[in-house]
Amino acid sequence: MTAPWSKALRDVWGGKARAILVVLAIAAGIAGFSAVLSAYAILTRELDRGYLATNPASATLWTDAVPDELTEAIVAETPVSAAEARRAVHGRIRTGPMQWRNLVLFVVRDYKDIRVSTLVPQEGAWPPAVGEILIERDAMQVAQARIGDTVLVRTTEGPETQLQLRGTVHDVGQAQARMENAVYGYINLPTLQMLGETPVLDAVKILVRENRFDEVHVRQVTGQVRTLLEARGHKVRNVEIPRPGRHPHADLMGMLLLAMSSFGILVLLLAGVLVVNLLTAMMAAQVRQIGVMKALGGTRFRIAGIYFAQAALLGVAAVAVALPLGMWGSRLLCLYMARFLNFDITSFAVPLWVYALVAAVGIVAPLLAAAHPVWKGCRVPVRQALDDYGVGRNAFGATRFDRMLASVQGIGRPLLLAMRNSFRRRSRFVLTVITLAAGGLFFMTALNVRASLILTLDRLFAQRKFDLSVALPSMQSVPAIERAIARTPGVARAEAWVYSEATLPGASAPSPATRHDGGGTAFTVLALPAGTTMLRQEFVEGRGLRAGEPDTLVVNTALAAKDRRLRPGQTVTLAMESGAATWRVVGVSDEPFSPAVAYVPRAYFDARRPGLTNSLRLALDRTDAPSIDRTKAALEENLSREGIHVSSSSSTRESRFGFDQHMVMIYIFLVVMSCIIVGVGGLGLMTTMSLNVLERRREMGVLRAVGASSRMVWLIVAGEGAVLGLVSWTVASLAAWPVSSLLCDFLVKTMFKSSSQFSFEWRGLFLWLAAAVVLSTLASFVPAWHASRGSVREALAFE
């Protein structure tokens, strides 16, 4: 081993306690970075692999009955490699005495020959026989059922029918049933007929033959298929073209992992601060050694290489510690995300480029952090270096701030010395405060973002003065509904609304079975009765609906963002189920996290179909879950006696749960990252206190020699840690408001395409104050203990 490398190893080993702290801090950053980077590589590969393995449909076209010869003609006459007929039917499902739950039934002609948007059998029977139903595996939690159970199913057109639950399937392309609070079921055509529905399939899923991932090409081919269908007398109601080759949740997951990677890089930067502190102190303590090496012919570059080698050793050790932790963390993250997004991971293999990048970052980061202190330390002239008597050459009191601090009176001597000592090494003080403040900043930011999202959802749901929404399959008699409600205990108030759909100018008119297409042109229309008490809207522009104005329209913020013409004072013509209608826009309501919705007076529909409704809003006497369930069951039974079926119902409590499930990823991510940053900050403080004690060993000896007790010395050192903790708390507190507001706005706009209302969580200030005091006390405990236990002779002999 060469002399430079030998010196580098001896120096690191000589300060092994401090080196271990720095290695742990760097390892924390590298572990977080490698965990997120590995998870990103695994999840993007597995999510796309699992999704593409199902041959996801390039497009879906909704029409009328689709016979086999029609799908054969599509394949023969258009650039389509596969075309299959499907159907989706909305209904209700009940297991045993449990309440009715919303159900979406998917109907396939031949389960043994699915070539587009395939299903993966999981447990039980495959395929479903007549009178049997399979349920998507994630929806089993919503259904609260087990394989082998007998379930009751009721569609919008048929009677209650018993079906056997025979198995589960995995449908990769479906949204999570837990979040949608719906059950996904899979049946065949004869079973559909048993349920009282016409046994026909009304949707065509196609797979383009070439350039499957070229959206322009997919739209061209879809246009050809639409032309063929309509030429053969099958009018196309709607078209859906998903983003080619991308799982519906790929962007959301990628954005979340990108944010995590950014925080991992931030942790690395904070760990680099510790390298700067350590090498700055080391260079200051070895000034005379540097002078000797220069006097013996050592060049600036050769000497700098020794200290860069030390930084590289720290990086290599950190990488060795961090990689196993990072791989373990990535596996946990992958399992959580896979469960959350309902897809399978077949391999946790990490690509080689991830290992190479992590190793490179782990070694280069300490080298970059060491560049300034090493280069600066090696510039000292030989005469000045040989004349150095160790650290502490810069006298306290040389600046106005020092003199102001020295003039502070009225506090105990230990605390006064602790305050003065904290500011002796300004650059180290600033770097340590930044590191520790970053932990507090993101701890408070996590609380503030959570509080802001909760406040935003609270305001959204506060506008809804109803507790239960009930959807009917078709327009029904209002008097009959009122009789059923009057017999239902627990209902305080009720209103009849009308649900419809419309499209923006230039799009084709929707039908009752219309689904939102990939372009997002279709949106919901809700007709409200005059003077409604079930909705209290907040407006960002204009005003609400008024009695006697049947042609007015209110849009929410999501719909207003789709077309600049949807602004107060504008007139717009919409294509609706009843035909084209011209409306005068009077207001824009603030509805974050909401899909596009327009509100119109119910008088518009009353003039065309008086005394009919297809949507109910009910306020209940009691809103706990058991009471809501009892009211639901009683209401549906009373409506059934009037000959009215319910297609779906949802409580406000259930809707809120779905929103909260979407937010839980953000909450967990922010809390985990803030904990990691706090840990790095604690290690940084411990390193700083160790360096401070080392540099002032002679000073500690002098204090002991003039009568200071071990307890007094311990209090001085612990006080320095407390001062650093309080200053970092002040910095974090001042930055928490603007940083939290910007981060919350960025996350919500990027991930949910919406806006949020900022809320500052004041408890976070006091929680972090307590945490900063405890953390600084713990971080300074060991250095303070060492300082108070050293002998006077050894301390005075230290140079």
Image (cartoon, grey):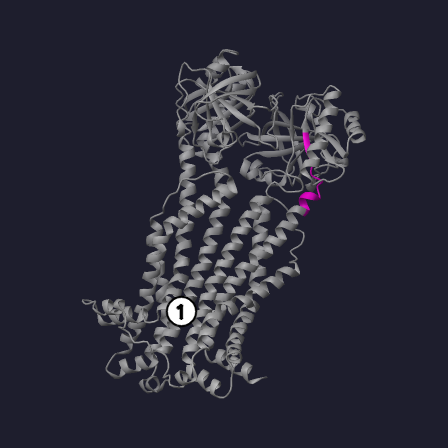
Identify whether 54 is placed above or below 307: above
Q: How many labels were placed on the picture?
A: 1
In magenta stretch: residue 51: yes
Q: What residue type is labelled 1?
A: Met
Q: Nearer the viewer, residue 218 or 345?
A: 218
Judge from the rendering whether residue 552 lies leftward or rightward of residue 420; answer left or right. right
Extreme residue toward the right, this view: 76
* Horizontal and vertical percent position of residue 203: 69, 27
Extreme residue toward the bottom, this view: 296
Q: Going 40% across and 69% down the picture, which residue do you hit?
A: 686
Identify whether 453 is placed above or below 265: above
Boundaries of the magenta span: 49-60
* Horizontal and vertical percent position of residue 512: 60, 21
Q: Quadrant of residue 229?
A: top right
Q: In which quarter of the image is residue 238?
A: top right
Within 10 Å of disc 1 (Cα), the crowding (few <14, some 14-19, many 20+) is many
Q: The residue tagged with tag 1: helix, strand or loop?
A: helix
In magenta stretch: residue 738: no
Q: Going 78% across and 26% down the picture, which residue do you hit?
A: 68
Residue corresponding to mark 1? 686
* Horizontal and vertical percent position of residue 250: 60, 44
Whether residue 57 is visible to the viewer of this picture, yes or no, is no
Q: Which of 398 and 542 is in front in this view?
A: 398
